[in-house]
Each structure stands twice: as C-alpha cells, then as structure tokens.
Amino acid sequence: MTASSPQRLRSFVTGQLQLTRAVAHALKARPFNPYPYLKPFIERASGVREPPVSATPHTVVYTRGSMRLLRYAAPRRRHRTPILFVYSLINRWYILDFLPGRSLIEHLTNEGFDVYAIDWGVPGQEEERLTWSDLLGGLIQTAVRWTLRVSKSRDLTLYGYCMGGTLALAYTSLYPEGIRNLVAQATPVDFSKGGVYTLWTSANHFDVDSLVDAYGNVPTPVLESGFLMVAPVQRVTRWLEVCRRIDDPDFVTTFLAMERWGADPVPFPGEVYRQYIKDCYQQNLFHQGRMKVGGENIDLGRIQASVLNVIAEQDTIAFPAMSEPLVKLVGTKDAETRRYPVGHIGLSASSKGSTHVWPSIAEWIGARSKAMES
C-alpha cells in the first residue's frame, strides 16, 4: 500500500457519502431535474466548475414586462441585414449562446452579423392574460421595430427555433413588412405528425381548459413531465455517464452547462398555451391555414420572404415529419430545406455545430443579406 492510499480511500468513502446524501435529498424533494443536488458532487469529483453560459457580450436594448431584447454586436460587422432570434416559450433563450466556441450566436457575430435575441424572461401574473395577438402584434412586432432601429436597417432576418419558429412563421404571415429572410429551425408545422406529443395533447386525453383555468400560467413541472416521460431512462443514465467520464473535463463542462440549462425552465403563459394546444396540436389548424389570431387566418402562403427550413434528422421533440411540409406551404419561390445529422438541441449546442451546421446556415443568410457599405 502506498503512502497516499489511505488518503485516496478516505476521499473515495467521503465522495460516496456525499453522493448518497445528495441522491437522498433529491429523492426527498422529487425534482424533475436533480441537477441542483448532484452538481456539487460532480464539481468536486471532476475539479470542473459550472461553466459560464451566454458568455457572448451583449446589451439590453429594450424591455417590456418580463421580455428583454438583447443585442450581440459583431466584432466587425459585414452585413447590413441584422438577425433577430425568436426562441420558444418553454425554455430559456441562452441555449442559442451555449458555451464559448459552441454558441450559434457567437458564430454568427463572428461572421459579421448584427444579432438580436428575444429573452421572454420568467412569466408572472401579468403574462397569464397574454394572447397570441399580444405576442405577435405586440411583443414580436416591437422587437422587430427596435432591431431595425438600433441596427439602422430597413429589413432583417427573422430566425425562429422550435415553437419560436412557429411564432416567427405566424408573425411573418400577418406582418410581412421588414422581414427579408426567415429561418425556421426545428419548427413544428404539421402537428398531426407530433407522435406521442400529439397523442398526449389530444382533446380525448388532455383538458387544457381545466389546466389553464386552474393555474393561469402552466407550471414548469407540468411541462417537464412530458419530456421526462418521453425518455425516462435517459434522465438517470446521463448521470451515470458523467460519473463514468468524470476525468474528461470537456465532457463534464458540456454536461454541467446542459444540465444547468435543463434545470432552468419557465412557466408557459396560460392563454398562449391554451390556443397553442387547441389550434395546433388538437385541431392542426396552423398547418391547414385556419388558425386565427386577431380575427385573421395564419396563412403561410402569404410569406414572400426567403425561407430556410432547418431540420435535425435525430430530433425527438420537433420530429422531422412535423417540419418537412413547410417549403410547400409558403408563398415564396426561394424556399429550401437543409437537414443535419444532429438532435433538437444539437442544432445549437453540439460539437458538430461549428463544422456541420452553422457555417451552412450562415452562408445561406449571408447570400440573402445586404452587405455593409464600404
């Protein structure tokens, strides 16, 4: 036995006791994500600290209620046409600016784009009454106007991700002015192809009115429970995997950042959720061009902006079949689908992003954007 063996043994026993206590606390609290309980153990065992997410420099250019409009200025701006990100209402926007070197927003700013992103914030009582009309004709329209004003541009690229892509499409159908290009990334369009999500939200199984009437904004445990039930085993096995690879600092860094994001969900504005479930998942009116917002149909055939449909081939949230019909529904002749061998989150955060995904998307946007005057 070497001189250090007793010390290693004590460290091992102490670590096991700490992990046991952390697991016991997590089981007692019964959280959907055990990250707050297990993070200290992973940090001590690996020597890796929780990494900084959303590290790309940015400023807040507008606020309204819980919403903020963030600007990520390019180090050297090459494109007059700015990009405005519209993210989903389910999770936080900063998955778009995940980690240094693994950030879609960072990549686009380095390519010379003036980038903006809507941070929806944490909905409270005021957002319980928010409607699709308020969302599109109020918040997103104001974000578009502020982006154009600050960027000193006449038009922009609207970039929607997941449900944010559905919102971006709906917005452009109703308010096309100033939208030069539209990128729909992992965007549900045909909700009849939503697999288990379509089944679970069916009117036969899910009374959305009772849920919203009872809670107002939809609580995060309700939203998280659906994702948990789709892959219940993975919730456990990924923690076993990080323990197995505890000596790999790059893996642990990515793991901690992803778990931090996953443990930071927000409530879903109640009235927006009510119409989203009824009109999209239960009746598929969005795909049929019959969803009404402010008394007007969301008709994707009215969209004349250039459209890029970005599909993750391994997506288990917005299944590829949900996104595939888009290019046939929009009115523009400049509509294209590009597919990438990653998952839903991988489009914005995987190690393949900087080589397999983002350069292709940046090239498409750049070819359809105005250049800065020399």
Image: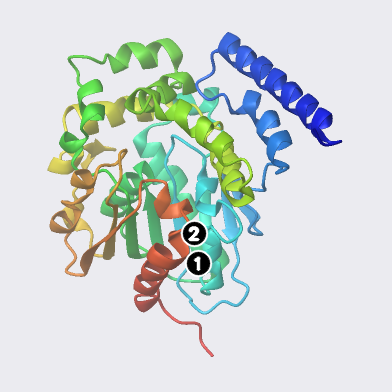
In the rendered structure, are the residues bearing label 2 and label 1 in contact, judged by CB atoms less than 8 Å apart?
A: yes
Q: Is residue 12 left or right of residue 360?
A: right
Mark 1: give few (<14), some (14-19) or many (20+) Cα within 10 Å: many
Q: Residue at x 15, y 51 (%)?
A: 325
Q: Residue at x 38, y 65 (%)?
A: 356
Tell me which corner region of the image, top left, top right, bottom left or bottom right, holds residue 76. bottom right
The amino acid type, in three-letter code, at marker 2 is: Leu
> Looking at the rendered structure, which numbered label has been put on residue 104?
2
Give the labeled residue for mark 1: 108
Q: Is residue 100 left or right of residue 232?
A: right
Quick one: quadrant of the C terminus? Answer: bottom right
Q: Residue at x 66, y 22 (%)?
A: 19
* Residue lying furthest front: 1
Mark 2: give few (<14), some (14-19) or many (20+) Cα within 10 Å: many
Give the image location of residue 302, x and y in percent: 19, 57
> Looking at the rendered structure, which numbered label has been put on residue 323?
none
The amino acid type, in three-letter code, at marker 1 is: Leu
Give the image location of residue 197, x and y in percent: 26, 28
Q: Is residue 368 left or right of residue 319?
A: right
Vertical relation: 148 (above or below) 373:
above
Give the image location of residue 129, x and y in percent: 44, 25
Q: SS for tag 1?
A: helix
Count of marks placed on residues:
2
Q: Nearer the viewer, residue 346 or 95?
A: 346
Give the image location of residue 100, x and y in percent: 61, 58
Vertical relation: 176 (above or below) 364:
above
**How many angstroms separate mark 2 from mark 1 (CA)?**
6 Å
